[in-house]
Image (tube, helix red, strand yellow):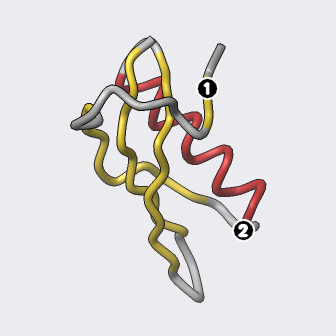
Amino acid sequence: MTPYSVTVRRTGVPALETKLLVRASSKLAAGELAAAVAEQQHGGMFEPRRVRRALVQADAVYDAA
């Protein structure tokens, strides 16, 4: 599992953008996990906007495992 920094954005009004640190097996899985976590925490529909490998090997806040 690789740590990813994912920026997600809520569609609709009011718009909200947030960044999450997740650990997943692929970029696609990281984006989906981050969107699901953001939806659960904030409500609404979120979509991944930017998925990048995390710069440091740190423990992820959310893990897909």
Query: Label 1 vs label 2: CA separation?
Result: 19 Å
Q: Is residue 44 above or below residue 8?
A: below
Q: Is residue 47 above or below residue 59?
A: below
Front in this rendered view, residue 37 or 11: 37
Query: SS of the residue at dot 1?
Result: strand
Name the mark on residue 63.
1
Q: Position of residue 47 (x, y in %)?
A: 49, 53
Front in this rendered view, residue 20 or 26: 20
Name the mark on residue 21.
none
Q: Is residue 15 above or below residue 1?
A: below
Q: Position of residue 38 (x, y in %)?
A: 64, 56
Front in this rendered view, residue 25 or 39: 25
Q: Is residue 65 above or below residue 15?
A: above
Query: SS of the residue at dot 2?
Result: helix
Q: Nearer the viewer, mark 1 or mark 2?
A: 1
Reading the image, the residue beneath label 2 is: 42
Q: Residues within 10 Å of mark 2 (few under 14, many from 20)?
A: few
Question: Residue at left 38%, top 55%?
Answer: 7
